[in-house]
Amino acid sequence: MSHDSKLAGAILLVIVIFVLVLAPDACAQSKYKSLRKFTRGADGYTPYGGLIFDQAGNLYGTTASGGASDLGTVFKLTPDSDGRWTEAVIHSFGGGNDGVGPSATLTFDPAGNLYGTTFAGGANSSGTVFQLTPNSDGSWTESVLYAFCSFSNCGDGTSPLDSLIFDDAGNLYGTTGAGGSSSGCNRGCGTVFKLAPNLDGSWTESVLYSFCSVKGCRDGSVLFAGVIFDQAGNLYGTTYSGGINNSGTVFKLTPNGDGSWTESVLYSFCSVKGCPDGGGPLDGLIFDQAGNLYGTTEFSDYGGLVFQLTPNADGSWKEKVLHNFKGGRDGTTPYAALTLDGAGNLYGTTWEGGRENAGVVFKLAPSSQGGWHETVLHAFLDHPGSLPYAGVTFDAAGNIYGTTSGNSNSTFGSVFEITP
């Protein structure tokens, strides 16, 4: 081999190493660990929701299938001294009145009770809000707080798909994917609801807003995502469709003095030719400390995107695309909401894309020039991690936790940890 050939080979080797180290999906920068591999059975499988921690460092989540009746579970993962995690099913849904198919992330109250939703089941086969109360012997007792479609034509909503939030008074707020008073969609176009606790232990539901109440559903329709509060007590969320271009909206609900709420659309997606501004937001929003909103859309002129909404002085909001997924190794089709760390970085998942088209966990870091840089922290390989539907959460040490739903053929979901 000539000197020039050797030199060319050495340069090529350096280039390959440089690309592998600095490529956006350089997964060697992060340590990935599978904490739980779900299989078809009594321990549950297909977790679509995310995870939450209790104060002792245990993880809680839901599976849409499996359990004693194969109708879904609520599970707990406890860390062991050897670094492993032990799973316990704290509730198996049995159908009938207690609900079917929990698909959302759970919520704790200050007393340590868990709250969640089921997409189906309940007294009217249209979904429930449930509570799990811990007992002194380590077991948990489930109670159904509300069964949807209790009103004529499901005017109270039906099919809740996402998690719940509390206000300071102990009321619960959430959304339903369908139902409500509007006739613009089959079985209604979705609602935002409130559950208020009564002195006798029961809960009273009220609908704050029924979507598609404006001609052409310009106010939005079909909710897959939950809602969040701002500091003034207004609620914010997304609709998957409706809006001026029928590609979804970001909306705000403002409380009035008489107990009613007024809806306003902050942004209608696909407002630019070709939809480079996105469309079809499947999950909810988060705020930063400056009052900007962040979220994801399933569609764009590529493979979904991450967006920012910034409030203007006149009350309008300006959308900015922070990252467009190209449909390749950087991920595609983000379904989940984002998570913000203390340094202002955004974290999330994509349903597909990556090395094996099984989804990725990504980080978006703001640059001093005003742009955002994406890093793929992990690309799933479908053994067992595959197709993450939910977002991620952090522990106190900055480690990242989440779930994958599995391909329902060879993999059936997992719980993972990523150490940056």
Image: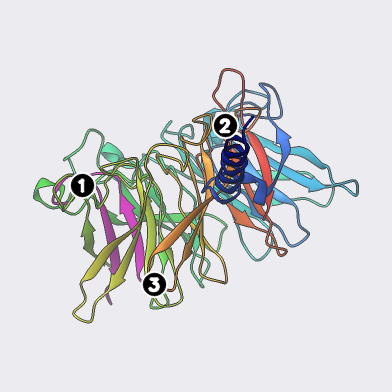
Considering only vertical position in the picture, is 1 above or below 415? above
State how far apart marks 3 and 1 are (Cα). Answer: 25 Å
Residue located farthest toward the right when viewing the structure as drawn: 81
Q: Tag 3: residue type?
A: Gln
Answer with mark 2 or mark 3, whichever residue precedes in sequence.
3
Instruction: Give the labeled residue for mark 1.
Output: 275
Q: Nearer the viewer, residue 107 or 393?
A: 393
For the record, the magenta segment spans 234-258
Q: Secondary structure at mark 1?
A: loop
Residue located farthest toward the front when viewing the structure as drawn: 2
State how far apart marks 2 and 1 are (Cα). Answer: 28 Å
Q: Tag 2: residue type?
A: Ser
Considering only vertical position in the picture, is 361 above or below 204? above
**Is label 2 in contact with label 1 (beta carbons under 8 Å)?**
no
User: Can you give x and y, in whole percent of width and height, for residue 229 in the image?
Assistant: 42, 68
Q: Nearer the viewer, residue 98 or 336?
A: 336
Considering only vertical position in the picture, is 383 above or below 173? above
Q: Which mark is residue 369?
A: 3
Foreground mark, 3 or 1? 3
- Is 206 displayed left or right of 246 in the figure? right
Instruction: Give the labeled residue for mark 2.
Output: 386
User: Can you give x and y, in whole percent of width and height, for residue 290 in the image?
Assistant: 41, 78
Query: Dot 2: few (<14), some (14–19), or many (≥20) neighbours within 10 Å?
Result: many
Instruction: Look at 56% across and 35% down and name the residue there.
Output: 98
Query: Dot 3: few (<14), some (14–19), or many (≥20) neighbours within 10 Å?
Result: few
State how far apart marks 2 and 3 are (Cα). Answer: 35 Å
Residue 269 within the segment the image draws in magenta: no
Q: Nearer the viewer, residue 254 or 141?
A: 254
Q: Quadrant of the C terminus?
A: bottom right
Foreground mark, 2 or 3? 3
Instruction: Look at 24% across and 46% down and name the residue there.
Output: 221
